[in-house]
Amino acid sequence: MAKKVLRSELEISGIAPNLLLKDIENTAPFIFKGEVNTEGKDRAYLAKLVFYKKNKEALKYVNLSEYFYLCMAAHWSTAGTFVPTNVDNQIREGLWKHNDVDGHIERMGRITIDSWLWNYEQVTNRKSYNPANNQIMSTHEGTWLSVAIGAYNALKKNKRDVLAQEVADVILAEIEKEEKLLLQLRENRDHINFLRSTALLAHNFGDLDRVIDQWNMDTEDPFRKRIYKLGHVLNKNYSPLLVYAGQINKKFLSVENHRHMSMRQARCLRKSHHFLIPIGPFMDEWGETLGKSNELSLDEKGEIIAALFDGYNRQNMAFGYARAYRGLIKSLPNGPTSLEAHVPYDLIQDIKKSHFSTVADISLPEFHLKFKSELEEYKCPITNLTF
């Protein structure tokens, strides 16, 4: 890959800052249109993106730690969108191994720690909730863990042991937070949020494991042993519920939560953060939001239905798309007839004849009851735990 040299003399092999900003505009234009709140320390990364949008010349003068911040802000703001920015390896490894890292690694470490508390609520709908304490968890915690373990390895390699320990302590705090969320949801018998959380934990700990492998951490490293494969292997430091959650996700939810490639076809979904896709298969409410929206024309709602049906056919047994279809159709003034002139006739007939339509016809209480019952009946083969 050809390297680029900015006017600040920063040499980078990744995407140029101005092109990175364009990628963010492509997938999350709502950030720059006043739709999201950018006030407060925990949303400063969004405010900085807006600043650079208005001051593009400043992008030519960023140094290594500021470029790292920009990549972090880009990924945080797009990780929940349909086309995330492709800077994962830069923030997990590449920039930590840059020739100029010695003069910037302390700030990069501090940015990593601070980003643990960045507010992502407006830039993702892939969330679970703990109503008992208003806690929210998303796939952003996995993004953070993947960056943090890269930071830890880089700091250790560069003999910044004190700061490395600070990062390690926050990694442990994040794992404990997710463990407590699971325990609380199970205790509260909150089946649906528990299921959502298993999908998120599988993603989050999977991200952590991938970067542990990417950095080739010593298999005998005590810290690695404490945090590796938490969703797969029993660990004396944590509840077996983490492994149980991994098995639950594998059995019930893994087919539902992926890259949603089909939904990229409906570019109208990028208009608002309210249109970002949630954790599947629990997509009824999302579908209702789309159906009720005045920002979407009937033609655009027809495009969304075509994308949902395509996604269902691509991803066998992914019920979330059918549930979103139900929510969307239900919210229209005249139901499916509202869209007859905006959806190809053949598509309407294909939907009517498919299992997609059968899944969409199930009432929401009945759909939830199905998952609750199956969760109650399931016994984990590794931990012998039940819900």
Image (cartoon, helix red, strand yellow):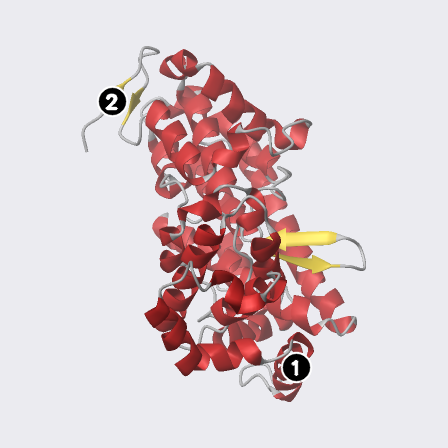
What SS does tag 1 mark? Answer: helix
Residue 216 appearing in the image: no
Residue at horizontal 43 percent and vertical 19 percent from the top:
103
What SS does tag 2 mark? Answer: strand
Indicate which disc residue 4 carries: 2
Q: Which amino acid does label 1 sit on?
A: Glu
Q: Distance between the residues labelled 2 and 1?
A: 56 Å
Label 1 CA crowd tier, 10 Å (few <14, some 14–19, many 20+): few
Residue 55 appearing in the image: yes
Residue at horizontal 64 percent and vertical 39 percent from the top:
119
Residue 227 spot, x, y in % from top left: 53, 57
Task: Point out the image quarter for the C terminus.
Answer: bottom right
**Horizontal relation, residue 145 to residue 376: left or right:** left
Q: What residue type is labelled 2?
A: Lys
The residue labelled by disc 1 is 366
In which quadrant of the rendered view does residue 333 lie?
bottom right
Residue 24 spot, x, y in % from top left: 43, 34
For the residue pair 76 and 23, the one nearer the viewer reads as 23
